[in-house]
Amino acid sequence: MDDLSRTTEQAAPPKMAQAYIEELVKKARGAAGRLAILSTAVKDQALLAMAEGLEAKSDDILAANELDLDAVSKGKEQTALVDRLRLTTERIAEMAAGIREIVRLPDPLGEAPRMWRRPNGMQVGRVRVPIGVIGIIYESRPNVTADSAALCLKSGNACVLRGGSEAIHSNSAIAAILSEAAEKAGVPAGAISFVERTDREVALALLKQDRYVDLMIPRGGESLMRTVTEESTIPVIKHDKGVCHIYVDADADPTMAERICLNAKVQRPSTCNAMETLLVHQTIARAFLPSLVQKLVEAKVEVRGCPRTCQVSPEAKQAAEADYGTEFLALILAVKVVKNMEEAMEHIATYGSRHTEAIVTNDYGRALRFLREVDASAVLVNASTRLNDGYQFGLGAEIGISTTRIHARGPMGLEELTCSKFIVLGSGQIRE
């Protein structure tokens, strides 16, 4: 759901929206300088308090989440949205666990990978520093509020969070708990800022705050991405849609391939790293597809296949051209039988979103070629696309999966939320 591309009934006059946002980002900018030099011990203590706060007040969060769920249509077309929006006691526990995982990670700030000495005797190096103030505009998922706040805090960045109107009650409750716990632990007020208003004018005003905000990260659908990139005067790192493929090669282990494909489609289909298109080598299609399609259908997946797929698997429906390249975010899968790996890679290049791509094969050479030639934020061999995730990669929680090439690509963890500055150690050197 994207409420940046439309005007809401409660839209604030531009001047009021500007004043509201300016007050918020100025406070965040003021907090950023103090947060950047906060000790690791204080930050970790604040993170632990934040995790405890989520668990202690889980009933309040669930009550707020019910208000959001009640406001969303329960129609079939909203199934993916409801799944992304819904919170449970288990999901809140996962949010808290993700924050505790960040505590266990090393503080990236102050790292100096190497120093080098110049002929004049001075030493030159780089050191990791926070980006500053990070604005995050996102849709549906309330867990993004907790993940983003925790990652920004540990990496020394102040954050300004703007969730979608569909999750306003959930996000507000989570943000209030997190900011209160952090401030009590010694984090400066304003380090975790939440935009309480959902009208379009306020969001657009945020995108113009390049004087106070250093980076903008949008997470959501194509319309949101387009609006943010067109309207923002702040540098943007996009976390775009995931049209993810798995290619099952001619000599793939069929048991492993079936397990990977089922996990990638069924485990949680509403996520951006779920498989949306399956490509199968023609020499194994007749032996491999019938069993897999039957199991997918048993898991309530609607399989939309090419003519060859439908021929060997009667349960599959005829796919339309538009199905290839669609991010379904639901129990729908497009399937195509291909002649060889070259055709599979051409299909991925044409229809993929450069998010996550995978090959299942026992051929070492083809695996290496797929890794080398396929363009995506993550390319996997013999593994589910669902594993392209900050937590699964050992980064702790993630702020999202960047599909941008500049600065950061793939899951954005702590290091990706820092930049570097040069440091020079001299002993009186001057330029001759």
Image: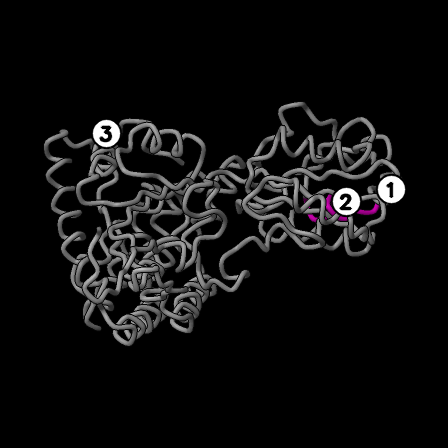
Give yes or no for residue 336 being in the magenta stretch.
no
Most common secondary structure along the magenta stretch? helix
Q: What's the image's color scheme? A: one colour
Query: Mark 2 and mark 3: span between their CA atoms?
Result: 49 Å
Q: Describe the element under mark 3 as helix, strand or loop.
A: loop
User: Label 3 crowding class (10 Å Cα cut-off): few <14, some 14-19, many 20+?
Assistant: few
Do labels 2 and 3 touch, CB within 8 Å?
Answer: no
Residue placed at 65% from the left, 47% from the top? 265
Give yes or no for residue 296 being in the magenta stretch.
yes
Would residue 235 appear left or right of 376 to someone viewing this image?
Answer: left
Do labels 1 and 2 touch, CB within 8 Å?
Answer: yes
Dot placed on the residue nearer the N-terminal end, 2 or 3: 3
**Residue for badge 2:** 248
Q: Quadrant of residue 92?
A: bottom left
Dot placed on the residue nearer the N-terminal end, 1 or 2: 2
**Residue for badge 1:** 284
> Hey, what amino acid is under mark 2?
Val
Dot placed on the residue nearer the N-terminal end, 1 or 3: 3
Q: Quadrant of residue 333?
A: top right
> Hey, what amino acid is under mark 3?
Glu
Kindly report which numbered mark, 2 or 3, lies closer to the viewer in this rendering.
Answer: 2
Rendered view: 316 above or below 42: above
Q: Range of the magenta residues?
A: 291-300
The x and y percentages for residue 340 are 81, 35
Residue placed at 13% from the left, 48% from the top? 26
